[in-house]
Image (spheres, rainbow, N blue to C red):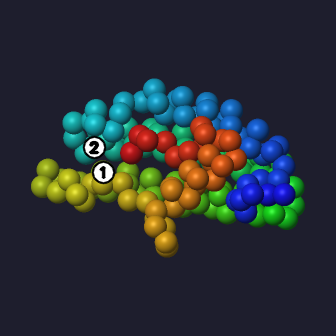
Amino acid sequence: PRDNPDRLDDPAFAEAAEPVCADARERIDALPGPFDGITPAERADQVEAGTRIVADLVADLEALAPLAPAGHDADLVERWLADWRTYLDDRWRHVERLRAATPDTPDRDLRFLVSGEAGPIDARMNAFARLNRMDSCQTPGDV
């Protein structure tokens, strides 16, 4: 029996997703860190590079979705992928904010904000990834 309603019954999707996420994480980790950019424009370039990798990752994960059997697993994977799509949109909005910044823009206005009705969705996304042994599929820490 399932001990957690968010655990996938069939590991096929998770087993296929983990190496895909690990590759994306490795490429993101090779980018300059969040505090390596001097100006908001430079930071925007860094975040945009990472966001392009995340966009490719989301597309790759969506291509793996059919590995999740119909019903419970497919529903869980689709909700997780919907969160990834929202997270990706949040990243693109962050790039736009950084690009629009002026020297007078307060730092607090340049923070990365994650959407979520009951709190930031990245916590839910990361919990699902950890529970299903997809540790590399947690949101990257580059923003």
- Of the residues shown, which amino acid type is indicated by label 2? Ala
Q: Residues within 10 Å of mark 2 (few under 14, many from 20)?
A: some
Q: Are marks 1 and 2 in contact (CB under 8 Å)?
A: yes
- The residue labelled by disc 1 is 99
Task: Give the camera-side residue of 106 and 80.
Answer: 80
**Which of these two is toward me, 53 or 77?**
77
Q: Mark 1: few, some, or many residues within 10 Å (few <14, many ≥20)? A: some
Please name the residue that numbered disc 2 is placed on: 41
Q: CA distance from mark 1 to mark 2?
A: 5 Å
Q: Could you say where residue 44 lies in the image, as x and y percent from the top left?
A: 34, 44
Q: Residue 64, image x and y in percent?
A: 77, 46
Query: What residue is drawn where x is 61% and y is 30%?
Result: 23
User: In the image as oriented, which residue stretches furthest toward the right?
Assistant: 70
Residue sitting farthest toward the left: 104
Residue 65 appears at what percent x and percent y? 77, 51
Q: Is residue 70 above or below residue 44?
A: below
Is any part of residue 57 visible from this angle?
no
Image quarter for residue 134? top right
Q: Is residue 10 left or right of residue 23?
A: right
Indicate the quadrant where residue 36 lies: top left
Q: Secondary structure at mark 1?
A: helix
The type of residue carrying mark 1 is: Arg
